[in-house]
Image (cartoon, grey):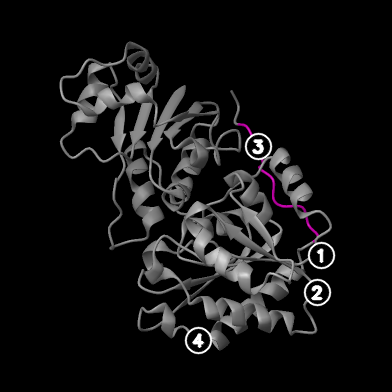
Amino acid sequence: MNRILVIRGGAIGDFILTLPALKALREAYPHAHLEILGYKHIAVLAENRFYAQAVRSIEYGPLSSFFAKDSKLSAELADYFASFDLIISYLYDPDGIFENNLRRCGVENLIHGPAKVGHHDHAARQLARPLEELGLRVDNLAARIFPSQADVIAVEKFLGQSPKPIVVFHPASGSERKNWPLENWIDLRNHLLGSDDFHGSFILASGEADEDRVRQLQTVWRNDHVQVARNLPLPQLAALFGHAMFVGHDSGISHLAAAAGAKCVLLFGPTDPAVWAPMNKNVKVLRAASGRLTDLGIVEVEAAVATALSAAVNRCNKTPRQSEATTAAA
C-alpha cells in the first residue's frame, strides 16, 4: 500500500473522533503516503503532525462534479483519485453517485466509513470499524494530537510571561442547550480566584461562533486582564491546551483539548457521553442527571476543577507532548 486517501468532512469534533482510525492506518502502513481530503483548517491538525503528509481542500470547486450523476469529471481530479491504492470515504453518499464517479476514474479499492454516527456505540469506534475490512482493529479510542515545534513556539510567544498553571475556559458550543449558564462560569472563576492556592492565569478560548458568550464574560471581567485566545489556528490552540487545565462543554474544542493532553472537565447535558465524550484518561465528564445543563450544580463542578487543577500544576512546567514523528516517512 503506497498511497492512501482519507476523505473526511465534518466539524472539528467529527475529525478528531476519526483520529484513532487514522492512527491505526498510519501504524499499519508506516511508509505509505497518507493524504486527507477535508476542510483544510481542520485537517491541518494531521498534516505533517504524525498522521498525514498532505491535506487537500474538500471545498475545491471542480470536486462538485463528482456529486452529480453522469457529469463531466475534472481530468485533474480523476488522475488524482486514481493515483491512490486505497480510498476511505466518510462522505454522505446515499445514492452512490460519488462512489460511481470514483469508479469511473479507475478507483478500485474503496472503503466506506459512516457519514453519520448512531447512538449504539462510541463515535470513535463507529468511525474506526470500517478498517476491519483491512484486518485492522482499533482498540485505543483516545484521540491524540501532536503539535509541531512551530506550533509550540507560537504558543509560547502568545503566552509570554503568563503565570502557570493556565486555566482555559471554553464557555460555548454548537448549541445553546449544551451550554452551562454564563453566571455559573462567572461563579466558577470567582471561586478559583478566591483560592489562596491559585496563582495562575485564565484564558478564554473563542472562535467565531463563540463571540457572543465570550464578549459577555469579557464585559464582566473587563478589569481582570483575562486573555482571549481568539481564532487561533487549531494546531496552535492544541499546543496551548498542552499547557493547560481546560473546562468546556460537549464541543469540538473540548475534543481538541482532550486530544492535546489538557486536564479536562467537560460538562454534558442533553448529549450522551457514552457516544460523544473523549475517551482520553485526562478527561472528567460531569453530566446533569436530568440532561439539562442548568441543573448541573456549581459545587460539583468546582470540586472536579480543583482535582484537575491539582494534576495540571504537577505538569505545568513541562513541554507539551510532541509527535514521535511529526512527519511520516515518505
Q: Measure the alpha-carbon separation of dots 4 and 1.
A: 29 Å
Q: Amino acid at mark 4?
A: Gly
Q: Amino acid at mark 3?
A: Ala
Residue 67, image x, y percentages:
24, 29
Residue 56 in magenta stretch: no
Q: Residues within 10 Å of mark 1 (few under 14, many from 20)?
A: few
Residue 26, image x, y percentages:
51, 36
Of 99 and 125, nearer the camera is 99
Is residue 95 positioned above or below 211 on the image? above
Which residue matches tag 4?
297
Sequence-wise first label, 1 or 2: 1
Which residue matches tag 2?
199
Q: Measure the alpha-carbon separation of dots 3 and 4.
A: 42 Å
Sequence-wise first label, 3 or 4: 4
Q: Which SS class for mark 4?
A: loop
Q: Which SS class for mark 1?
A: loop
Q: Residue at x 65, y 37 (%)?
A: 325
Label 3 vs label 1, nearer the camera: 1
Q: Measure the alpha-carbon separation of dots 2 and 3.
A: 35 Å
